[in-house]
Amino acid sequence: MPRLREPKDLQCSWRLEERVLGRGLRSVAGTDEAGRGCLLGPLYVAAVILDQTRRIPGIDDSKKLSAQQRSNLAMEIREKALAYKVVAVPASQVDALNIYEATRRAMIQSLLALDPHPEFVLTDAMRLQSPGRKPGFTIPYWAIIHGDARSVSIAAASILAKVDRDAHLDQLDRQYPQYCLARNKGYGTRAHLEALARYGPCPEHRRTYQPVKDLLVPRLPFASA
């Protein structure tokens, strides 16, 4: 496929999908994640194939939408999409793999679970092929900088991942109320960091993330001269 150029502006639309589909392909999927930078909780990844004939107004980068807008759009995406899949990666697996590899594998898992399978994939600047591994991921893809602000398919995936992750963090908030997870969703806010310093990490914290990692490293006793 000839080289495709990214649009210069950050307007979320069907332009990228139309460029791909205009080259003779029948289905294009978008994939994105939620919770990559969080100190606590699972990473969520989603893949979506939207229906060109049932376009959904208002889809945009999930970070630009209110919680109610995301919830409403998620319901409509699930109803009208040709296919979608959401994958949750527990904190322990994020620690074992590293966040980049955990994200890449979850994206591939979600994409391969789609029925119908996509003929092309749009990602939010994420490369799906693993260096040095063959044959690797074989579906052609386009890693787009700020893809969730430019592609409706990537944005739709970001909405599904964000809505499902936020719902899970609300459940974890009832289990671990000291960390105020319903408000911070696992991100390293001041309140979260203060609670982490006071109570220490819980089983849902990512052990390889600082400052969680710092709390788990034994402090050596001060040695006087």
Image (cartoon, rainbow, N blue to C red):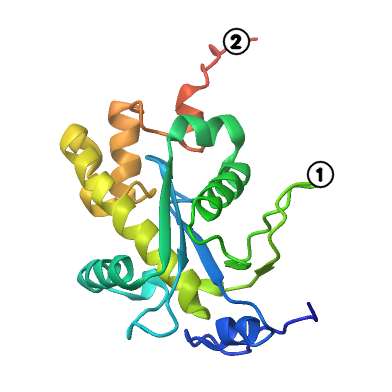
Q: Nearer the viewer, residue 118 or 183?
A: 118
From this view, report whether residue 193 is shown above or below residue 141: above
Quadrant assignment for the N terminus: bottom right
Residue 206 appears in the figure: no
What is the secondary structure assignment of the residue under circle 2?
A: loop
Residue at (52%, 21%) from the top-left corner?
A: 217
What is the secondary structure assignment of the residue under circle 1?
A: loop
Residue under numbered circle 1: 134
Residue at (63%, 89%) from the top-left corner?
A: 8
Q: Is residue 100 left or right of residue 52?
A: right
From this view, report whether residue 100 is shown above or below residue 54: above
Examine the image and state in which quarter residue 99 appears: top right
Q: Position of residue 118 (x, y in %)?
A: 57, 64
Which of the labelled discs sits on residue 185, or is there none? none
Which of the labelled discs sits on residue 224, or is there none? 2
Quadrant assignment for the C terminus: top right
From this view, report whether residue 189 is shown above or below residue 152: above
Q: Position of residue 159 (x, y in %)?
A: 36, 66
Q: CA distance from mark 2 to mark 1?
A: 55 Å
From this view, report whether residue 15 is shown above or below residue 59: below
Mark nearest the camera among 2 and 1 is 1
Q: Position of residue 221 (x, y in %)?
A: 53, 11
Residue at (73%, 52%) from the top-left corner?
A: 129
Q: Is residue 106 left or right of residue 159?
A: right
